[in-house]
Image (cartoon, coloured by chain):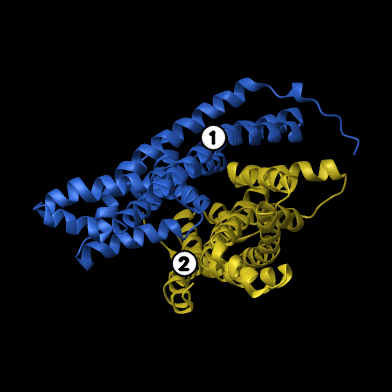
Amino acid sequence: MNYTFDFNAVSFAPLLRGLVVSLELTAAANIIGIVAGFGLALLLMSPYRLVRTPFMLFVEFFRCTPAIVQIVWIFYCVPMLFDVFLDPITVGIMALGLNLTAFNAEAYRASIQAVPKEQLDAGIALGLNPLQRVLYIVFPTAFRASVPVLLTNGIVIFQQSALVAIVAIADLMYEGKSLATETYRPIETFTIVALIYFAVSFPVTQIVGLLERGRQLLAS
Amino acid sequence: MSLDFSVLARFEHALFLGLMTTLQLTAVCILLGCSLGFLVGLARTSRSKALRFVSGIYVEFFRGTPVLIQLFWIFFCLPLILGVELTNFVSGVVALTLYMGAITSETFRASLNSIGPEQVDACVALGLPRRVQVTSVVLPQAVLRAVPTLLSNCVSLFKESALVSAVGMADLMFVGQNISNNTARPVEVLTIVALIYFVIAFPLTRGVTLVEARILKKLAI
């Protein structure tokens, strides 16, 4: 290989600008996902099939199609269908937020259903009414159990946020792509971009690992 | 606005070819990726510190960066580094195989770790040699336990394969975007594309639940 590396060709200012956009998208999507995901999880567990089914379809649809298809679909079709003009960042937040809502709802549902039956029995024995049982036993236990999955989903959305580059939102990936084309330095640029993504994701995955190990220790 | 799905009839064949590319790419990468993942999973549970370290870095890196950047890196940088031209398909296979290898290795690692120490103790008590322990006791159970997660890994790979459209490979997504640009009918075309992906991925995810509920329970492992 006779390629001379030149990492000086890569200017960091646009990459940092892009990173800020990526982080903003991630943060907004996570706020939507954590809040709306919880509501959606409750709807998914509704005793009425008529309520459950449409929301199940929503979740399955987001879980079973590629995120890039969702983003491109929302980007092109929502403005046409509803005859509104949305600025690209809003569209990006909407797409990522809806996607995360679907995944988080599943996480909440799984952890609510995983609350051991003995705990509820204990609640009955203590004379708590159904609402108290849900508020004081189910939700706190379930929420704590879902934290690792929520964090994982949150960081997956950070990685998926790179997809908005395809619809020309100036995130980290997009800035990296333009920089690579401008400077003719794809190796250096893409390596640095990958390292930036890694530097943000890796600590979070480590924290998730620690949390899970802690939970296992507590459980054993 | 009025919807007109009849425009799609003209592009039936193109969409079909795109879907075939997607499926081929996915199938090849599932085979290569699972094999790679199995080896890496073994490396991550091995006793050699160096092996664990190297395989750990590989897995963390591929799980910690967006698949899109991995694809771009391999499409644009690998040919420069190797000094050879790679076809679209080869680069796509390399990128998605490395991704699949990383995620399946975690699956295999978890299932290898889930084989309790008492089983190994039992093997020792029975006087089984180390090789028999691995091939007849640990591996069959580990592979069976990995099946549900491997299936969801395959669904993830199928979905991630849509990213190759971003580097100009004519898969289902790419064909769909082209048609939608040419006909100016994004709503119809993109909806159909999304539905095609859904129709394939959804039964697979149901399959995961089925395998978990029925087969594994029956085998009691």
Screen quadrant of the N terminus of chain A: top right
The reply, left or right, for residue A175 in relation to residue A180 is: left
Mark 1 residue type: Pro
Quarter of image, res A60: bottom left
User: B78 or A120, which lies in front?
Assistant: A120
Please provide percent x and percent y for residue B190. Answer: 49, 57
Q: Which chain is painted in yellow?
A: B
Which is nearer the eye, B196 or A129?
A: A129
Rendered hue of chain A is blue
Picture disc at residue B205: 2
Specify the farthest residue to the right: A2
Residue B34 x/y as whole percent: 66, 63
Residue drawn where x is 20% and y is 57% of the image: A120
- Could you give the CA–CA distance between mark 2 and mark 1, rounded to whole angstroms? 30 Å
Camera-side mark, 2 or 1: 1
**Looking at this view, is A19 or A201 the one in front?**
A201
| Crowd band around label 2 with a 10 angstrom C-alpha radius: few (<14), some (14–19), many (20+) | many
- The chain letter under disc 2 is B
Residue at 46% over, 52% down: A70
Please check whether the numbered discs 2 and 1 fall on a single chain.
no
Q: Position of residue B185 (x, y in %)?
A: 48, 55
| Residue lying at 57% horizontally and 43% vertically, measured from the top left | A166
The residue carrying mark 1 is A203
Rendered position, A217 above or below B97: above
Residue B163 appears in the figure: yes
Element marked by disc 2: helix
* Residue B10 placement (x, y as % from top left): 56, 68
Tell me the chain of label 1. Answer: A
Looking at the rendering, which quadrant does residue B130 occupy? bottom right
The kind of residue tagged 2 is: Thr
**Does residue A155 show up?**
no
Asked if disc 2 and disc 1 are in contact, CB closer than 8 Å, the reply is no
